[in-house]
Amino acid sequence: MNYYIVICAHNEESYLAATLNAVLLQTMPPKKVVVVNDNSTDDTEAILDKFVSGHKHIIKVNRSSSTLHMPGAKVVEAFNDGYKMLDEEYDFIVKLDADIILPENYFEKISELISADPRAGILGGFAYEQDKNGTWKLNHPMNKDHVRGAFKSYTKQCFKAIGGLKNAIGWDTVDELLAQFNNFKVVTDDSLIIKHLRPLGASYNKQARYLQGEAMYRMRYGYRISFIASLKIALKRKNSGLFLDTLRGYNMAKKQDLPFLVSKKEGEFIRKLRWRNIWNKLF
């Protein structure tokens, strides 16, 4: 299969080389790799230039944006800048962070999963992060039918059906909900162990917590589902403040009457899907 990778990089001098080397070692190599250098102020670009000079299929894109690290719009804008550099001759497209080390057979396995299931739409493995003792441990904050935003593969058909990535916080949840609305599956494989070099959320500030609640509102969850989802996040992270901040973000978004990310019909499907998942876990 043909596939393209778009890597979003902001001040990744400590990790970018390891990520690109892992890509170069793939048993099924990508057709093109676009690395978007997003306003880096460290040696990210110098490191990237060395790879670009030695590999014709690696392309550099420079963009200027805020130096503030925030989830959502910033990373999707960077991805879209990279995506513009690509043609339509691909079977699947990959959104990859610049602090990820993939196993050598990663994309070969992704292609096999796609071939095995015509409904496969979004695919990926599982992230492992080092604890304080240096041991790599599974760190997956959501259900195992979720693919982390740091390493998502989309079949071309699914990517087109969901309209690409939403330029907002919650893009890596709404994409999976819209995939299911369009009759695609989210496929994960726990044999694909991915090393995530930067701990999850290490650079997110307090404002990002409000944005999580905002995303729930804009995805048309409704208050009750948002309440449960906020509680789940807080319990998972063992941080009661996350619960309050997330709900505050939801209420702020509602008060401001922010635009929704999905249609009424899509929102109805999403709520039914969420309630079904909640009841399945309870009973």
Image (cartoon, rainbow, N blue to C red):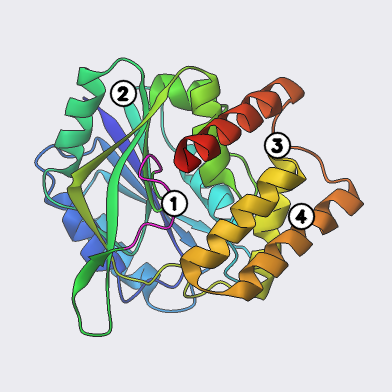
Q: Nearer the viewer, mark 2 or mark 3?
A: 3
Picture coordinates of residue 108, whole percent (x, y) = 15, 35
Query: Magenta residues?
Result: 139-146
Task: Please tell me how many numbered marks the rendered image carries.
Answer: 4
- Please state which of the two labelled residues, at mark 3 or mark 1, is closer to the viewer: 1
Q: Provide the residue designation for mark 1.
A: 142
Q: Which amino acid, by three-letter code, is at mark 4?
A: Tyr
First in sequence: mark 3 vs mark 1: 1
Gap between marks 2 and 1, in whole Å?
27 Å
At x 68%, y 49%, the residue is 226
Kindly report which numbered mark, 4 or 3, lies closer to the viewer in this rendering: 4
Q: Nearer the viewer, residue 47 or 236?
A: 236
The rendered magenta stretch, by its main secondary structure, is classed as loop
Looking at the rendered structure, the secondary structure element under dot 1 is: loop
Q: Which of pointers 2 and 3 lies earlier in the amino acid sequence? A: 2
Q: Position of residue 96 (x, y in %)?
A: 37, 50
Residue 250: which disc?
4
Instruction: Work out how far the residue at label 2 is from the one at label 3, CA to CA, in angstroms.
Output: 26 Å
Give me the disc on residue 76. Answer: none
Mark on residue 261? 3
